[in-house]
């Protein structure tokens, strides 16, 4: 890395850094900031609807969609309201949809996660039927929404999460999700070996074309609070710090990313987004794979809460935040504001 004219840069020297620029008159970068058209002409970062991914919650056994109090504008959907929301998103240009399910019944193993008629599988089938290949369907592949204890895998007698049993279940879930129409399965449990186990499970079932978006650097974060209301998946005891990354660790996050690449990940994911933008940049630079960053529930809720108090301009803060995530290197931005943002672009 070189530091040139106060900028950090990677790679070979650029002409702009080595050819002397006129000493007089003084440099005038403001020339290109004078009008909105000039600023737009030289803007480096784009944010367009196809780069947005909308997370959607579908709940079994409800007759009407239910708003999530801590996430304004977000609902727990019925299959019907899921279909309606997906139509609006697609009309706005958001063609990437990430499905989370809330089952009617939970058990210790989380068996509804791989049930062929599970709520996620039914939601996937409905969306595939409505949109064919015009959408990219992502399925969250985890167990915490499906286990009665709220952890991301089955428990051993001492209450710890059984890694290898968890990844075997993720593989089963990925197979039924893919069979129901998922283009991409997204393991979010941070178990060791989860990508390899899912890849092997998919391939053995003849699902070689299903892609894996790996949550490689997911931190044990306080920013997931509102999501746990929406997905009804708060751990009933303890927390997730024995499987999610410690917030102080960046090098470890890069090792996790490298392991997921080696195991066959197709897309990598960093989560949360804004407190971990260094990881967004470093994972993108070090792997070159398509990278998603998840602007999570707490990040979304904070913008709304401050805007409600009149302390910030919520629309501008949200738009600036999502653009900043792109600027840091994310190809895809997963956000509860996807529909709103797309309509504004
Ligand atoms: C777990 C999962 C979580 C989120 C996505 N998948 C919650 C957690 O780890 O507790 C959080 C997403 C958000 O906060 O928006 N399978």
Image (cartoon, grey):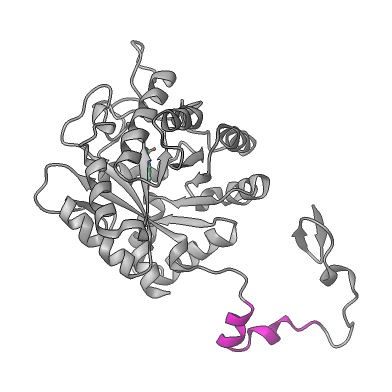
Residue 229 location (% of width, % of height): 26, 43
Residue 8's quadrant in the figure?
bottom right
At a point 36% along the width and 11% down the height, the residue shown is: 158
Number of marks in the image? 0
In which of the image's four quarters is ligand 1 placed?
Answer: top left
User: In the rendered image of this protein, does residue 179 appear above or below residue 56?
Assistant: above
Determine if the magenta segment contains residue 290: no
Establish if 28 lies above or below 299.
below
Is 298 situated above or below 261? below
Q: Which residues are magenta?
A: 27-42
Q: Residue furthest left?
A: 63
Please state the horizontal and vertical placement of residue 122, each as a whole percent of the image.
22, 44
Q: Quadrant of the C terminus?
A: bottom left
265 or 47, nearer to the observer: 265
Q: Residue at x 39, y 29 (%)?
A: 171
Answer whether residue 197 is visible to the viewer in this image.
yes
Q: Quadrant of residue 80?
A: bottom left
Residue 249 vs 181, above or below: the answer is above
Q: Visible in this render: residue 313?
A: no
Residue furthest to the top in view is: 157
From the viewer's perspective, is 234 left or right of 294? Answer: left
* Residue 323 spot, x, y in % from top left: 52, 65
145 and 94: which is toward the camera: 94
Q: Is residue 34 magenta?
A: yes
Instruction: Using the image as rendered, state which of residue 2 and residue 58 is in the foreground.
Output: 58
Principal secondary structure, stretch drawn in magenta: helix
- Name which residue lies at 50% across and 26% down: 192
Report the residue at 57% width, 87% height from top: 37
Q: Is residue 83 left or right of residue 268?
A: left
Residue 26 in the image: x percent, y percent? 83, 84
């Amino acid at each position: 890395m070189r530091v040139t004219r106060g900028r950090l840069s990677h790679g070979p020297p650029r002409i702009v850094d080595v050819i002397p620029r006129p000493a007089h008159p003084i440099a005038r970068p403001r020339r290109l900031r004078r009008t909105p058209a000039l600023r737009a002409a030289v803007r480096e970062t784009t944010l367009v609807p196809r780069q947005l991914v909308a997370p959607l919650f579908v709940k079994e056994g409800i007759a009407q969609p239910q708003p999530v109090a801590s996430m304004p504008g977000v609902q727990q959907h019925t299959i019907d309201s899921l279909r309606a929301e997906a139509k609006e998103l697609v009309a706005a240009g958001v063609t990437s949809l990430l499905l989370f399910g809330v089952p009617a019944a939970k058990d210790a193993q989380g068996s509804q996660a791989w049930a062929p008629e599970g709520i996620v599988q039914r939601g996937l089938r409905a969306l595939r039927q409505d949109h064919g290949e015009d959408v990219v369907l992502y399925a969250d592949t985890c167990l915490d929404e499906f286990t009665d204890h709220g952890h991301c895998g089955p428990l051993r007698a001492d209450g710890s999460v059984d890694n290898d049993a968890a990844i075997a279940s993720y593989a089963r879930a990925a197979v039924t999700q893919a069979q129901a129409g998922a283009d991409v399965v997204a393991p979010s449990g941070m178990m060791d070996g989860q990508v390899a186990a899912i890849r092997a499970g998919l391939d053995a079932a003849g699902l070689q074309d299903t892609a894996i978006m790996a949550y490689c650097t997911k931190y044990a974060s306080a920013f997931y609070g509102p999501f746990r209301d929406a997905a009804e998946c708060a751990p009933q005891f303890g927390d997730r710090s024995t499987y999610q990354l410690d917030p102080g660790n960046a090098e470890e996050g890069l090792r996790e990313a490298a392991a997921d690449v080696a195991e066959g990940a197709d897309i990598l994911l960093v989560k949360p987004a804004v407190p971990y933008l260094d990881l967004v940049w470093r994972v993108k630079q070090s792997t070159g794979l398509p990278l998603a960053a998840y602007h999570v529930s707490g990040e979304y809720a904070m913008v709304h809460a401050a805007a409600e108090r009149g302390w910030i301009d919520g629309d501008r803060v949200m738009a600036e935040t999502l653009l900043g995530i792109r600027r840091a290197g994310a190809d895809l931005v997963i956000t509860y504001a996807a529909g709103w943002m797309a309509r504004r672009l």
